Image: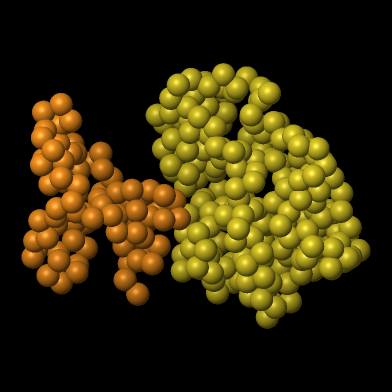
Chain colours: A orange, B yellow
Amino acid sequence: MKILNCPLNGPRNISEFTYGGEYHAMPDAAKSSRSDWAEYIFFHRNPAGPVIEWWCHTASAYWFLAERDTRNNEILRTMPVAEYLSEQQA
Amino acid sequence: MNPFTITGGAGIRSPLQRWHKSQNAVFDSANGAQFVSRYQAVELEANRAKNLGLADLTTFPRCGIKAGHDGQYLRTQGYNLPGGANLAALQSSGSLLLRLSDTEFWLLSDLQQQAKVFAADLVDLPATCYDLPRLHSHCWLALSGDMAPDVLAKLCAVDLRCSAFAVNHIAQTSLARVNVIIVRTDTASGAPRFYLLSDISSCEYLWHCLLDAMQEFSGTTIGLNALQQL
Protein backbone atom coordinates (compact mmCIF):
# COMPACT_ATOMS: atom_id res chain seq x y z
CA MET A 1 0.00 0.00 0.00
CA LYS A 2 1.36 3.41 -0.97
CA ILE A 3 0.77 6.19 1.53
CA LEU A 4 0.45 9.87 0.66
CA ASN A 5 0.57 12.48 3.41
CA CYS A 6 -2.32 14.90 2.92
CA PRO A 7 -1.47 18.31 4.45
CA LEU A 8 -5.04 18.56 5.80
CA ASN A 9 -5.90 14.99 6.76
CA GLY A 10 -2.58 13.28 7.40
CA PRO A 11 -1.32 9.96 5.98
CA ARG A 12 -3.87 8.23 3.76
CA ASN A 13 -3.96 5.31 1.33
CA ILE A 14 -3.07 6.47 -2.20
CA SER A 15 -6.48 5.17 -3.34
CA GLU A 16 -8.07 8.16 -1.56
CA PHE A 17 -6.33 10.62 -3.88
CA THR A 18 -6.80 11.91 -7.42
CA TYR A 19 -3.90 13.10 -9.55
CA GLY A 20 -4.37 16.60 -10.98
CA GLY A 21 -1.39 17.04 -13.31
CA GLU A 22 1.79 19.09 -13.16
CA TYR A 23 1.68 22.41 -11.40
CA HIS A 24 2.39 25.45 -13.58
CA ALA A 25 2.11 29.08 -12.60
CA MET A 26 -0.99 30.53 -14.24
CA PRO A 27 -0.23 33.10 -16.96
CA ASP A 28 -1.32 36.69 -16.48
CA ALA A 29 -4.69 36.87 -18.25
CA ALA A 30 -4.12 40.49 -19.27
CA LYS A 31 -0.77 39.92 -20.92
CA SER A 32 -0.72 36.37 -22.24
CA SER A 33 -1.40 35.20 -25.77
CA ARG A 34 -3.50 32.27 -26.94
CA SER A 35 -0.40 30.17 -27.30
CA ASP A 36 0.56 30.98 -23.70
CA TRP A 37 -2.82 29.68 -22.54
CA ALA A 38 -2.56 26.61 -24.75
CA GLU A 39 0.88 25.94 -23.29
CA TYR A 40 -0.48 26.33 -19.76
CA ILE A 41 -3.57 24.18 -20.24
CA PHE A 42 -2.46 21.41 -22.59
CA PHE A 43 1.30 20.91 -22.32
CA HIS A 44 3.40 19.41 -19.56
CA ARG A 45 7.16 19.37 -19.15
CA ASN A 46 7.07 15.72 -18.09
CA PRO A 47 10.61 15.72 -16.63
CA ALA A 48 12.53 12.70 -15.36
CA GLY A 49 13.09 13.87 -11.80
CA PRO A 50 11.36 15.93 -9.12
CA VAL A 51 8.16 17.62 -10.28
CA ILE A 52 5.50 19.63 -8.45
CA GLU A 53 2.03 18.17 -9.03
CA TRP A 54 -1.59 18.85 -8.11
CA TRP A 55 -3.26 16.17 -5.99
CA CYS A 56 -6.71 16.04 -4.46
CA HIS A 57 -7.77 14.14 -1.35
CA THR A 58 -11.09 12.95 -2.70
CA ALA A 59 -12.87 12.32 0.61
CA SER A 60 -12.38 15.93 1.71
CA ALA A 61 -12.14 17.53 -1.78
CA TYR A 62 -8.89 19.14 -0.64
CA TRP A 63 -6.43 20.18 -3.35
CA PHE A 64 -2.76 20.45 -2.47
CA LEU A 65 0.68 20.16 -4.06
CA ALA A 66 3.09 17.25 -3.92
CA GLU A 67 6.67 17.04 -5.08
CA ARG A 68 7.24 13.63 -6.68
CA ASP A 69 10.33 12.12 -8.26
CA THR A 70 9.13 10.61 -11.52
CA ARG A 71 12.18 8.34 -11.74
CA ASN A 72 11.26 6.23 -8.73
CA ASN A 73 7.71 7.45 -7.91
CA GLU A 74 8.86 8.66 -4.49
CA ILE A 75 6.80 11.42 -2.87
CA LEU A 76 9.38 13.92 -1.62
CA ARG A 77 6.96 16.25 0.19
CA THR A 78 3.39 17.51 0.21
CA MET A 79 2.21 21.02 1.04
CA PRO A 80 -0.76 23.38 0.93
CA VAL A 81 -0.83 25.58 -2.16
CA ALA A 82 -0.40 28.73 -0.08
CA GLU A 83 2.78 27.36 1.47
CA TYR A 84 4.31 26.64 -1.93
CA LEU A 85 3.34 30.03 -3.34
CA SER A 86 4.85 31.87 -0.38
CA GLU A 87 8.02 29.82 -0.89
CA GLN A 88 8.16 30.95 -4.50
CA GLN A 89 7.68 34.60 -3.58
CA ALA A 90 10.36 34.54 -0.88
CA MET B 1 -37.34 31.62 4.31
CA ASN B 2 -34.36 30.78 6.42
CA PRO B 3 -32.33 28.41 4.20
CA PHE B 4 -31.05 26.60 7.27
CA THR B 5 -34.47 25.72 8.62
CA ILE B 6 -35.55 22.15 8.02
CA THR B 7 -38.98 22.17 6.42
CA GLY B 8 -40.80 20.08 3.85
CA GLY B 9 -43.75 18.56 5.66
CA ALA B 10 -43.73 15.00 6.95
CA GLY B 11 -42.19 13.63 3.78
CA ILE B 12 -38.50 13.46 4.71
CA ARG B 13 -37.52 9.82 4.91
CA SER B 14 -34.27 7.94 5.00
CA PRO B 15 -33.18 5.88 1.97
CA LEU B 16 -33.23 2.99 4.48
CA GLN B 17 -36.94 3.46 5.23
CA ARG B 18 -38.00 0.27 3.47
CA TRP B 19 -35.32 -1.74 5.22
CA HIS B 20 -36.36 -0.34 8.58
CA LYS B 21 -39.97 -1.30 7.84
CA SER B 22 -38.91 -4.81 6.91
CA GLN B 23 -37.38 -5.07 10.38
CA ASN B 24 -40.65 -4.00 12.03
CA ALA B 25 -39.25 -0.64 13.10
CA VAL B 26 -41.45 1.74 15.03
CA PHE B 27 -41.22 5.27 13.63
CA ASP B 28 -41.57 8.67 15.18
CA SER B 29 -41.37 12.09 13.56
CA ALA B 30 -39.94 15.52 14.25
CA ASN B 31 -39.17 18.54 12.10
CA GLY B 32 -41.25 17.03 9.33
CA ALA B 33 -39.04 13.96 9.12
CA GLN B 34 -39.43 10.34 10.15
CA PHE B 35 -36.89 8.39 12.15
CA VAL B 36 -36.75 4.99 13.86
CA SER B 37 -37.54 5.19 17.54
CA ARG B 38 -37.05 1.46 18.14
CA TYR B 39 -37.01 -1.97 16.51
CA GLN B 40 -37.61 -4.01 19.64
CA ALA B 41 -37.93 -3.29 23.36
CA VAL B 42 -35.88 -0.17 24.14
CA GLU B 43 -34.21 -1.66 27.22
CA LEU B 44 -33.13 -4.68 25.20
CA GLU B 45 -31.75 -2.50 22.42
CA ALA B 46 -29.93 -0.24 24.85
CA ASN B 47 -28.34 -3.17 26.64
CA ARG B 48 -27.13 -4.76 23.42
CA ALA B 49 -25.96 -1.40 22.10
CA LYS B 50 -23.56 -1.01 25.03
CA ASN B 51 -21.62 -3.65 23.16
CA LEU B 52 -22.41 -2.49 19.62
CA GLY B 53 -25.30 -0.63 18.02
CA LEU B 54 -25.97 1.05 14.69
CA ALA B 55 -28.56 3.81 14.27
CA ASP B 56 -29.79 5.72 11.23
CA LEU B 57 -29.92 9.47 11.87
CA THR B 58 -30.15 10.42 8.21
CA THR B 59 -33.32 12.49 8.61
CA PHE B 60 -31.92 14.53 11.51
CA PRO B 61 -31.32 18.26 10.91
CA ARG B 62 -27.90 19.37 9.78
CA CYS B 63 -26.37 21.91 7.46
CA GLY B 64 -23.06 23.38 6.44
CA ILE B 65 -21.54 26.75 5.77
CA LYS B 66 -18.47 28.15 4.11
CA ALA B 67 -17.68 30.70 6.76
CA GLY B 68 -14.88 32.77 5.29
CA HIS B 69 -11.32 32.99 6.52
CA ASP B 70 -10.80 31.04 9.73
CA GLY B 71 -14.58 30.80 10.32
CA GLN B 72 -14.60 34.39 11.45
CA TYR B 73 -18.28 34.83 10.63
CA LEU B 74 -19.39 31.96 12.90
CA ARG B 75 -17.19 33.30 15.68
CA THR B 76 -18.94 36.64 15.49
CA GLN B 77 -22.27 34.80 15.75
CA GLY B 78 -21.26 33.30 19.08
CA TYR B 79 -20.42 29.75 18.00
CA ASN B 80 -17.78 27.81 19.84
CA LEU B 81 -15.35 27.07 17.02
CA PRO B 82 -13.15 23.98 16.98
CA GLY B 83 -9.47 24.84 17.24
CA GLY B 84 -8.52 23.54 13.82
CA ALA B 85 -9.52 21.48 10.82
CA ASN B 86 -10.81 17.97 11.47
CA LEU B 87 -12.00 18.83 14.96
CA ALA B 88 -15.52 19.16 16.37
CA ALA B 89 -16.90 21.27 19.20
CA LEU B 90 -20.08 20.82 21.21
CA GLN B 91 -22.26 23.93 21.32
CA SER B 92 -24.22 25.16 24.32
CA SER B 93 -27.41 24.26 22.40
CA GLY B 94 -26.32 20.62 22.26
CA SER B 95 -25.52 20.66 18.55
CA LEU B 96 -22.12 19.59 17.26
CA LEU B 97 -20.07 21.89 15.04
CA LEU B 98 -17.67 20.09 12.71
CA ARG B 99 -14.74 21.90 11.17
CA LEU B 100 -13.78 20.14 7.94
CA SER B 101 -11.25 22.72 6.72
CA ASP B 102 -10.19 26.25 7.61
CA THR B 103 -13.40 27.62 6.13
CA GLU B 104 -15.94 24.75 5.94
CA PHE B 105 -18.19 23.93 8.90
CA TRP B 106 -21.09 21.52 9.38
CA LEU B 107 -23.59 21.70 12.20
CA LEU B 108 -25.31 18.51 13.39
CA SER B 109 -28.38 18.67 15.59
CA ASP B 110 -28.48 17.16 19.06
CA LEU B 111 -30.21 13.80 19.49
CA GLN B 112 -33.32 15.46 20.92
CA GLN B 113 -33.41 17.58 17.74
CA GLN B 114 -34.06 20.59 19.91
CA ALA B 115 -31.11 22.71 18.82
CA LYS B 116 -31.81 25.09 16.00
CA VAL B 117 -29.44 24.22 13.21
CA PHE B 118 -28.14 27.66 12.42
CA ALA B 119 -30.19 30.41 13.94
CA ALA B 120 -32.20 32.84 11.88
CA ASP B 121 -29.53 35.48 12.38
CA LEU B 122 -27.27 33.54 10.02
CA VAL B 123 -29.51 34.14 7.02
CA ASP B 124 -27.93 37.39 5.94
CA LEU B 125 -24.58 35.92 5.13
CA PRO B 126 -21.72 38.19 4.08
CA ALA B 127 -20.42 37.83 0.55
CA THR B 128 -17.51 35.68 1.70
CA CYS B 129 -19.86 33.01 3.10
CA TYR B 130 -22.43 30.65 1.63
CA ASP B 131 -24.55 27.81 2.89
CA LEU B 132 -24.04 24.13 2.14
CA PRO B 133 -27.34 22.22 2.40
CA ARG B 134 -26.43 18.81 3.80
CA LEU B 135 -29.73 17.18 4.78
CA HIS B 136 -30.31 15.56 1.40
CA SER B 137 -26.71 15.21 0.26
CA HIS B 138 -25.38 12.96 3.01
CA CYS B 139 -26.56 10.11 5.16
CA TRP B 140 -25.84 10.15 8.88
CA LEU B 141 -25.25 6.93 10.78
CA ALA B 142 -24.23 6.46 14.42
CA LEU B 143 -22.13 3.49 15.47
CA SER B 144 -21.97 3.09 19.25
CA GLY B 145 -20.61 0.71 21.82
CA ASP B 146 -17.40 -0.77 23.13
CA MET B 147 -16.79 -2.78 19.95
CA ALA B 148 -17.36 0.13 17.55
CA PRO B 149 -13.63 0.80 16.99
CA ASP B 150 -13.12 -2.89 16.17
CA VAL B 151 -15.84 -2.77 13.52
CA LEU B 152 -14.32 0.33 11.95
CA ALA B 153 -10.91 -1.33 11.96
CA LYS B 154 -12.31 -3.95 9.56
CA LEU B 155 -13.46 -1.32 7.08
CA CYS B 156 -11.09 1.63 7.37
CA ALA B 157 -7.30 2.04 7.16
CA VAL B 158 -7.18 4.96 9.60
CA ASP B 159 -6.43 4.05 13.21
CA LEU B 160 -9.73 4.81 14.96
CA ARG B 161 -9.01 3.06 18.24
CA CYS B 162 -9.96 5.21 21.22
CA SER B 163 -6.29 5.48 22.20
CA ALA B 164 -5.38 6.97 18.82
CA PHE B 165 -8.51 8.86 17.78
CA ALA B 166 -9.66 11.23 20.50
CA VAL B 167 -13.13 12.51 21.25
CA ASN B 168 -14.21 15.33 18.92
CA HIS B 169 -11.65 14.34 16.30
CA ILE B 170 -12.69 13.94 12.68
CA ALA B 171 -11.29 11.70 9.95
CA GLN B 172 -12.24 12.36 6.34
CA THR B 173 -11.34 9.11 4.72
CA SER B 174 -12.55 5.95 3.02
CA LEU B 175 -14.77 3.41 4.79
CA ALA B 176 -15.58 0.24 2.85
CA ARG B 177 -14.18 2.14 -0.17
CA VAL B 178 -16.74 4.93 0.22
CA ASN B 179 -15.80 8.51 1.10
CA VAL B 180 -16.95 9.21 4.62
CA ILE B 181 -16.57 11.73 7.41
CA ILE B 182 -16.04 9.99 10.75
CA VAL B 183 -16.56 11.94 13.98
CA ARG B 184 -15.86 10.50 17.41
CA THR B 185 -18.41 11.86 19.85
CA ASP B 186 -18.80 9.60 22.85
CA THR B 187 -22.07 8.94 24.65
CA ALA B 188 -23.01 10.57 27.96
CA SER B 189 -21.82 7.44 29.77
CA GLY B 190 -18.45 7.58 28.01
CA ALA B 191 -19.01 4.71 25.58
CA PRO B 192 -17.44 5.14 22.14
CA ARG B 193 -19.76 6.59 19.53
CA PHE B 194 -18.90 7.50 15.96
CA TYR B 195 -20.99 9.56 13.58
CA LEU B 196 -20.53 8.49 9.97
CA LEU B 197 -21.51 10.94 7.23
CA SER B 198 -21.37 9.75 3.66
CA ASP B 199 -22.86 10.56 0.28
CA ILE B 200 -26.53 9.68 0.48
CA SER B 201 -26.33 7.52 -2.63
CA SER B 202 -24.01 5.21 -0.65
CA CYS B 203 -26.33 4.98 2.34
CA GLU B 204 -27.76 1.51 1.77
CA TYR B 205 -24.40 0.09 0.73
CA LEU B 206 -22.65 1.49 3.79
CA TRP B 207 -25.45 0.38 6.14
CA HIS B 208 -25.21 -3.22 4.95
CA CYS B 209 -21.40 -3.19 5.00
CA LEU B 210 -21.56 -2.11 8.64
CA LEU B 211 -24.19 -4.74 9.50
CA ASP B 212 -22.01 -7.38 7.90
CA ALA B 213 -18.93 -6.21 9.80
CA MET B 214 -20.93 -6.08 13.05
CA GLN B 215 -22.06 -9.71 12.88
CA GLU B 216 -19.00 -11.21 14.54
CA PHE B 217 -19.42 -8.78 17.46
CA SER B 218 -23.14 -9.50 17.90
CA GLY B 219 -24.07 -5.92 17.04
CA THR B 220 -27.62 -4.73 16.62
CA THR B 221 -29.54 -1.95 14.93
CA ILE B 222 -31.03 0.52 17.38
CA GLY B 223 -33.54 3.33 17.30
CA LEU B 224 -33.24 6.80 18.71
CA ASN B 225 -34.71 5.82 22.09
CA ALA B 226 -31.91 3.36 22.80
CA LEU B 227 -29.27 5.71 21.41
CA GLN B 228 -30.37 8.41 23.83
CA GLN B 229 -30.01 6.04 26.75
CA LEU B 230 -26.38 5.18 26.07
Identity of the residue drawn at 8% across and 61% down: A47
The image position of residue A51, as x and y in percent, is 14, 57
The residue lying toward the viewer, choosing from B192 and B75, is: B75
- Answer yes or no: is residue A90 visible: no
Identity of the residue drawn at 71% across and 35% down: B6
The image position of residue B140, as x and y in percent, is 65, 53
The residue lying toward the viewer, choosing from B62 and B90, is: B62
Q: Is residue B191 left or right of residue A1?
A: right
Q: Residue furthest front?
A: A34
The image position of residue B192, as x and y in percent, is 64, 59
Identity of the residue drawn at 89% across and 58% down: B26
- Total numbered circles: 0
The image position of residue B11, as x and y in percent, is 80, 44
Which picture quadrant has residue A85?
top left
Q: Which quadrant holds the C terminus of chain B?
A: bottom right
Identity of the residue drawn at 14% across and 64% down: A69
Which picture quadrant has residue B132?
top right
Q: Which quadrant holds the N terminus of chain B?
A: top right
The residue lying toward the viewer, choosing from B61 and B47, is: B61
Q: Is residue B173 above or below residue B115?
A: below
Q: Is residue B132 above or below residue B77?
A: below
Which picture quadrant has residue B80?
top right
- Answer yes or no: is residue B161 visible: yes
Q: Is residue B223 left or right of residue A60?
A: right
Q: Is residue A88 left or right of residue B112?
A: left
Q: Residue furthest right?
A: B41
